[in-house]
């Protein structure tokens, strides 16, 4: 099986945590790691770049890559807890778990997360409410491997809140689009079919590998504010 950059990143993290490479240590170069793992040098470069962006390693030209003395998490975008977002707007919060099941994840999801095609994942659909009205419809595919045993009760605490507060993230990506409401979104959110919704799609990877793909469809009129 050919390793992806996420696999290389996970193995480098494992070795750092195991103190095979302690803080300040110079780790093998890209060429050596590429030969060890049987991958292209570009694959190793992407993995190390992701770790550098997360503050786990420090990279300098002609000086190599070293384990950071004081690793820090450098988040470009803080993932909000939807409950706190709603309460911060002065509205009452509630949520409804509409679906929770294991199923083979769609190819676009596994491809984005670097997982095998048809990988069984946990499918969750959650409707977040603000002041008793639909606020965000959260559609999520979750890598069950990141969950403890016994698994959390996502009917008691939303997957959004549990993941933000319990899973350490290394990297991810997010895209914002204005999409017409699907039949399901229109039905659940109580809007006409085709209504323009602000949609955020996000993938995240943690220290143990891929975590989740999530689609957040916001009710009409939603406004996103970012602080830099």
Image (cartoon, helix red, strand yellow):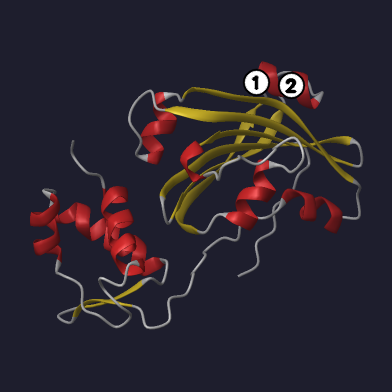
51 or 148: nearer the viewer: 148
The quarter of the image holding the C terminus is bottom right
Residue at (34, 62) in percent of width and height: 13
> Mark 1 — residue?
182
Element under label 1?
loop
Kindly identify the residue that appears in the image at 11 percent across and 56 percent down: 36
Left or right of residue 47: residue 199? right
Relative vertical location of residue 213 with respect to residue 87 in this rendering, above or below:
above
- Give whichever of 212, 36 is nearer the camera: 36
Label 1 with label 2: CB-CB less than 8 Å? yes
Percent position (x, y) of residue 219?
76, 36
Residue 203 relative to residue 87: left or right? left
Which residue was labeled with disc 2? 186
At 78% across and 55% down in the image, what residue appears?
Answer: 84
* Numbered circle sitting on residue 161: none
Q: Position of residue 127 (x, y in %)?
A: 75, 33
Q: Reply above or below: 142 against 86.
A: above
């Amino acid at each position: 099986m050919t390793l992806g950059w996420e696999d290389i990143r996970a193995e480098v993290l494992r070795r750092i945590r195991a103190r095979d490479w302690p803080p300040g240590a110079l780790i093998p170069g890209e060429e050596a790691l590429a030969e060890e793992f049987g991958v292209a040098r570009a694959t190793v470069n992407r993995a190390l770049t992701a770790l550098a962006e997360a503050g786990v390693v420090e990279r300098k030209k002609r000086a190599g890559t070293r384990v950071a003395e004081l690793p820090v998490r450098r988040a470009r975008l803080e993932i909000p807890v939807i409950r706190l977002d709603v309460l911060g707007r002065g509205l009452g919060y509630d949520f409804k778990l509409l679906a929770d099941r294991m199923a083979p994840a769609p190819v676009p999801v596994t491809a984005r997360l670097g997982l095998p095609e048809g990988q069984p994942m946990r499918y969750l659909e959650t409707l977040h409410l603000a002041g008793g009205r639909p606020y965000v419809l959260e559609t999520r595919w979750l890598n069950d491997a990141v969950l403890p045993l016994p698994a959390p009760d996502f009917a008691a605490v939303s997957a959004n809140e549990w993941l933000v507060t319990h899973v350490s993230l290394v990297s991810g990506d997010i895209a914002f689009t204005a999409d017409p409401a699907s039949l399901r979104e229109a039905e659940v959110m109580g809007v006409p079919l085709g209504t323009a919704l602000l949609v955020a799609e996000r993938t995240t990877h943690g220290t143990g590998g891929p975590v989740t793909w999530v689609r957040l469809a916001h009710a009409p009129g939603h406004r996103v504010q970012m602080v830099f």
